[in-house]
Every structure is written in structure tokens, then in C-alpha cells.
Amino acid sequence: MSHAHTPSAESHVLADRRGRLGVITLNRAAALNALSLGMVREITRLLQHWANDDSVDAVFIRGAGRAGKAPAFCAGGDIRFFHQAALAGDPRLEDFFTEEYALNHLIHAYPKPYIAWMDGICMGGGMGITQGASHRVVTEHSKLAMPETHIGLFPDVGGGWFLSRCEGRLGEYLALTGQVLGAADALAAGLADIALPAASLAIVLDELTAAPRLTPQRVGDLLRRHALADAGAATVAAHRDDIDRHFSQADMPAIERSLQAAADAGSDWARRALDTLHHQSPLMCAVTLEQVRRARSMSLADDLRMERDLVRHCFHLRPGTASETVEGIRALAVDKDHTPRWNPARVSDVDPAMVAAFFTSPWPATAHPLAHLR
């Protein structure tokens, strides 16, 4: 039995109560369920309400689909809004990141089972609302990534924290290249817990709905009954030695030199990785490398505070069209010319002082917008 819990059919976040399960559906399929500020606020409201509702044992989050189209859980934040808001000085840009990162923290600390159904595209902000889940489910359609360096940003939403906890130097590799992971690679990287067939969604929801109680153990047992016997090939995992060798280098110039030497020696994998890096913002790659390495020794709360500092600087250290992030979004999603004019244009021209400026907080600790996170 389903009880509507949403103010209108047009809402971008739908909520249902099914037995002792709260179900959230991201309902912005035409935009690949990209997160808006209103969606962040509604998800936060629902999670806070259900955390204190004794009749709700667990939460399930999924993305709405489009008939005949490939599935998408959530393609990330609404980058066109970021671009418009940055150029217009819209204060909602600040609100978006503060509230999104607080939501990410809430999910990691959630007191009840939180099941994330990562069917199809799950990138950026989509990873932010799934990586803290107690049960991270991928399917044969899953495409997980943190591709922010493609738009002159960095892997935020706690990306520094969860990528830095991947084995070896996989975190640096995923952060810098934005490499897309299928189900097998997501499992191997520790960014998913179990792979289920996409077609099992309805029966999984029915079984969760029918359960008299939903404890973490019971949820896990139910999911395991439907697990895929074969999640496919882990193609990224096959290059772990290469990743560790190249992406453990001291800085971006050293990483590029290492990859270049391997490419010159005939490595197609190194050549492709190098080509990807050559399309990114040299400055933001250097910032991203520093972010991931700092985050390894940080708590999640401290990482999110650092990322809030970083994202403020992305839009304000060099405001307007001078921002690497504004330029990156312009090239990818606004003008769609795919020729961003990065400044500086080469890794060798990135001054360490440029990078260091991103890691100076614009707020005193007591006035930080995420000071309340623990």
C-alpha cells in the first residue's frame, strides 16, 4: 500500500510510505534527476522527519526513469544553475552548496538503514547522496563517476573523503580523470556494496514493504537473495598497478611525466589517461590532487568544511567569467563548444601559491557555514 507524501504531482522529489519503508524518488528525469536547491531541501526534510518517526525503519532512494531511455539515478548538481547564479551573483548558489554538503553529512550519519539504488548514471551530487548509504546497490546499468574536473571544479559532496579511502592511489586517479565505473569496478573500488539486476527493483521494493521490521541485517539479507552472480569485468581494477605507480607521484607535473614515459613506451592506457588530463583545468587538477591527499587524514565533517571553502573559492577567487568553474561549465553545458580556455593553460604554469589560496578558509572557524557538522 502506498501513501503519497508529496505536496504535488509536479514535485521533483516524490515520497511514499510503503509498510515500514520510506521511499524517495528523484523525479526530474528530463534533467537526469540533477539536484536543485529545492530537491536538496526536500530530501533533507524527509530524512529528518523519518529519522524521528518510529513507524519508519528504513529509507530507499531511487531515480525516476524515462520510457525508452537509459536509466539515471542522478547526474549531479544542476550545473546550468551554477553558471547562471555565479554570473548573476545569486545568493542561492551559496545556499545550494552549504545545504547539499549538510545533506551529505546527514546521510553518512543516518541512524536507520538507507538503501541507495544506483541504477544508471550516478555522478557528482548523485554520489554525494549515495556514498553515505548503509546499502549501496549498483546494477548492470550503473555508471558511477566524480567527473567534476571536466568542468573546472573538484570532486565535492564529500568526494575528498570517500575517494581518498579507496585502496592505493585509486582515489587520485578517479578524482583527476573522472573515470566512469561500471558495477564490477564500483564494487572493487569500495564505492558500492552489492550488485542487483535492474529488473529486480519491483520485487525488492515489494519484499521490503512486506517485511514486519527492517533491521540492517534483514535489509542486507533481502538484497543478497537477489544479487547478480556476475557483475561483469572490473576493467579499472585491472590497471591498479599502473594507477598506483603513476598517481602516487608528488604533484601534477610528476604525474604527467610518469604517464608520458609509459605512453612513450607503448602503454595505450597511459596515453588515454594523459589525454584525459590534458583536457582538464591544470589549476583545478592541482587543487583536486591536494584535496584528496589532505582528506585522507580528515574526518568527513572536516573534509566537507574544506570542500565548502574550496567551492567558495572556485566561484569567488576569480569571479565571473574568470572562474575556471564558470568557464568549464560554459564550454561543456552552455555554449557546448568543448574548448574551455583554462588559465593557466599548462600544468607547468600552475604556481603553488595559486593552489594554496584555495585552502585558506574565507570564514573564521566559528562562523563557517558548516561549523555545526560533527
Image (tube, rainbow, N blue to C red):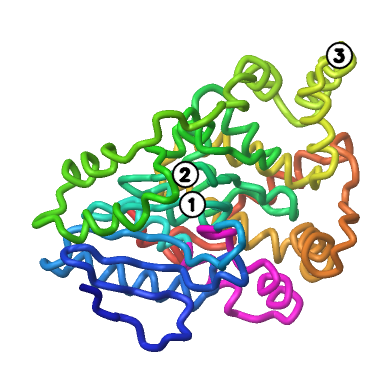
The residue at 36%/67% (across/down) is 24
Side of 192 where 182 appears, left or right: right
Does the magenta run of residues contain 62?
no
x%, y% of residue 135?
32, 45
Tell me the residue that label 1 is attached to: 119
The question of residue 83 being in magenta is answered with yes
- Give the mark nearest the N terminus, 1 or 3: 1
Callout 3 amino acid: Gly
SS class, disc 1: loop
Q: Quadrant of residue 145?
A: top right
Mark number displayed over residue 145: none
Badge 3 is on which residue?
Answer: 266
Kind of residue at badge 2: Thr
Q: Picture coordinates of residue 358 (x, y %)?
A: 66, 51
Residue 95 visible in the snapshot: no
Residue of label 2: 139
- Residues rendered magenta in the picture: 72-100
Q: Residues within 10 Å of mark 1 (few under 14, many from 20)?
A: many
Residue 149 in picture, x, y percent from top left: 71, 48
Q: Is residue 254 visible?
A: yes
Q: Is residue 155 above or below residue 335?
A: above
CB contact under 8 Å: marks 2 and 1: yes
Residue at horizontal 56 percent and vertical 68 percent from the top: 66
SS type, badge 2: loop
Residue 63 place in picture, x, y as percent: 47, 63
Query: Mark 1 to mark 3: distance in Å?
Result: 36 Å
